[in-house]
Image (spheres, grey):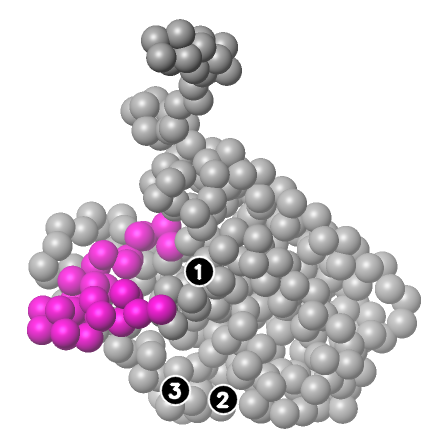
Amino acid sequence: MIATLLKWVVPWEFSWVFLAVFLATCVLYVRGSRRLTVSFSRQLVFWIGMAIIYLSLQTYLDYYAEHEFFMHRIQQVLLHHLAPLLIVTAYPASVLRAGLPLAFRVRVLRPLQRSWPWRLVMGVLLNPAVATVMFIGFILIWLIPSLQTTAMLDWRVYRFMNWTMLISGFAYWSLVLDHRPHPPGRMIAGLRVLSPAITMTPQILAGAIVTFSKTDLYPIFEICGRAFTFNVLTGQLIGGVITWVPAALIESIGGLMALRQWLWLSRHGRLPRRVPRQAIVRSSSGTVLNK
């Protein structure tokens, strides 16, 4: 019993970098939640998202992701869609910041955020167009059979692939689920609702192509040794459906959450009001006459 449990808990491929980032995030959130009032629901959603990331990358589930196409697609949907969506929903930025020592925030974090390299990186990474292209692009890029083969044969490329999925997911959902109006939010409220419908379309097409393909697009899983014994095309079909249906469903939920946030901003009068064009013309004409 214990041996079986350890088999599932012990990482298939251990990563010191991932463990350090994961533990640091957990410690900061615990410290921050003690200093700030954080509702139980927000904490629950955050920890569920963190648990999904850990289970996807540092347990025996990673073995199946490397040896079966449809398990790999489950892993990618969890890392790219579900986990970032859940964690961003908890709005953890203020809590993580509160978890840092005050001296570190004053002497290190604040000057870093004001520095031009930080603003440049954040400006590019959180640009709505760039974040949207990255969100779609990394899904499609890693579905290319040749790149999928490279990722499965080289552990460095494999880890890079997982990090790109996580980072692009966090960047995109932080824009779509931003609770602030625009500005200071980077994305217009209406575009936050429309964006998931745009990003899910290429994913649906890619999933459909994989689903209805009659040839083995990813023979690398045969080379690595498949974890299950059923038909190759059946596994590929399941993987295509996972890329197609659950991913689109999660994005639909994200769009509905953005719509709810848009309605809340509108109801509380926090959306920027457009001045009627006639009023602008009258105002400018009155200014000319007064001169």
Distance from label 2 to label 3 (Cα)?
Answer: 15 Å
Element type at mark 2: loop
Q: Which residue is mark 1?
A: 123
Q: Quick check: is 62 in the magenta stretch?
A: no
Q: Main secondary structure of the magenta part?
A: helix
The residue that appears at 31% across and 62% down in the rendered structure is: 47
Q: Earlier in the sequence, mark 2 or mark 1?
A: 2
Q: Quadrant of the C terminus?
A: top left
In the image, 273: left or right of 253? left
Between 273 and 11, the one lying in front of the other is 273
Segment tinted magenta in the rendering:
88-116
Q: Which residue is mark 3?
A: 17
The residue that appears at 67% across and 78% down in the rendered structure is: 68
Q: Which residue is mark 2?
A: 12
Q: Can you tell which quarter of the image residue 238 is in?
A: bottom right
In the image, 159: left or right of 288? right
